[in-house]
Image (tube, rainbow, N blue to C red):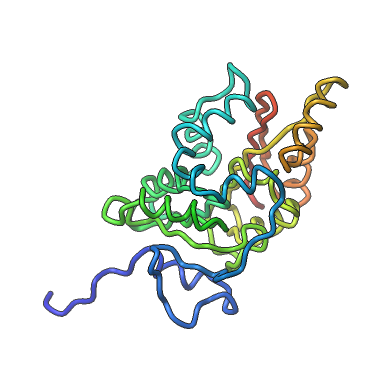
Amino acid sequence: MSGQAPPASALERALPLLDADARPQRFAVPRGYLDLLGGIDVESTGTAFDLMNTGLVPRIYERYWRPGLGRVAKGVLGPSMRDEHRIARLLLGLTPGDGVLDVACGPGNFTRDFARVVAADGLAVGIDASTTMLERAVRDTPPAEFPAAAYIRGNAVELPFRDHSFDAVCCFAALHFFDDPFRALDHMTRVLTPGGRIAILTSCRLRTPLPRTIDGLLGARSGQRMFERDEITGALEERGFKDVRQRISGLAQFVGGRLR
């Protein structure tokens, strides 16, 4: 029809999900993502965090950096990156039309996958604090191919979204870098709808004394927290999740659940 307004972009559809205090007075996205932090720099949690904010790591993250570190953490026989995507989709149970939040989305490798599944009527929002990661995400996510994908620069611990905004929340390979991971879990729980699903990939300590000493040292050097085997599953159960599932692979664990 002549004069009909074009369909709203994914970012425009994400705006009503933001807390009133977080919504920008003017909708402007010159870099392709909505920046809620402006000139604010997020405090570093260690070497790994600093590397994520360089110009180099975002360029090699999806093809080399993330698969390489993942192989070290998960072990030689652990899940591949393709398996990780499959596990995330299974834990989240996404269907067309769903809304999903990808916390600490990096260059958008999982956000794009979710956007394909939820299709044009759904919404896949990636949030991250790194400008270099988000610039790469925008570059690799053409709107014509991924109409459901939207990127926001914001605090991944203190999520800027309204309560009950998303059907699913994913946080893969990031929770152990947060300065307050359990507060982050509080916010992930808060933004989920009743029955909403969560998927987490994070660190997991070994059982025997010598390896525990080694993984503790590695965690301290890199700035990441090494979670005990029952910390994340217990935290989800405390927050009202049921059907909590866990798969441990080397120094990594996949955890999912459904909110009551």
Quarter placement of the N terminus: bottom left
Q: In this rendering, is residue 222 above or below 209?
A: below
Seen from this angle, which residue lies furthest bottom?
Answer: 25
Q: Residue at x 47, y 55 (%)?
A: 134
Seen from this angle, which residue lies furthest top?
Answer: 77
Seen from this angle, which residue lies furthest right?
Answer: 209
Image location of residue 82, percent across then percent down: 46, 29
Q: Residue at x 41, y 43 (%)?
A: 113
Q: Along the horizontal axis of the image, is 242 left or right of 165?
A: right
Say which of 7 and 174 sits in front: 174
Q: In this rendering, is residue 29 above or below 193?
A: below
Image location of residue 160, percent across then percent down: 60, 67
Q: Along the horizontal axis of the image, is 168 left or right of 82?
A: right
Number of marks in picture:
0
Image location of residue 88, percent across then percent down: 52, 38
Image location of residue 166, percent across then percent down: 53, 59
Say which of 231 and 133 sits in front: 133
Q: Residue at x 73, y 51 (%)?
A: 181
Say which of 218 and 118 sits in front: 218
Q: Residue at x 78, y 25 (%)?
A: 206
Q: Along the horizontal axis of the image, is 26 left or right of 157?
A: left
Seen from this angle, which residue lies furthest left?
Answer: 2
Q: Locate residue 14: give its quadrant.
A: bottom left
Q: Locate residue 130: give its quadrant.
A: bottom right
Say which of 226 and 100 sits in front: 226
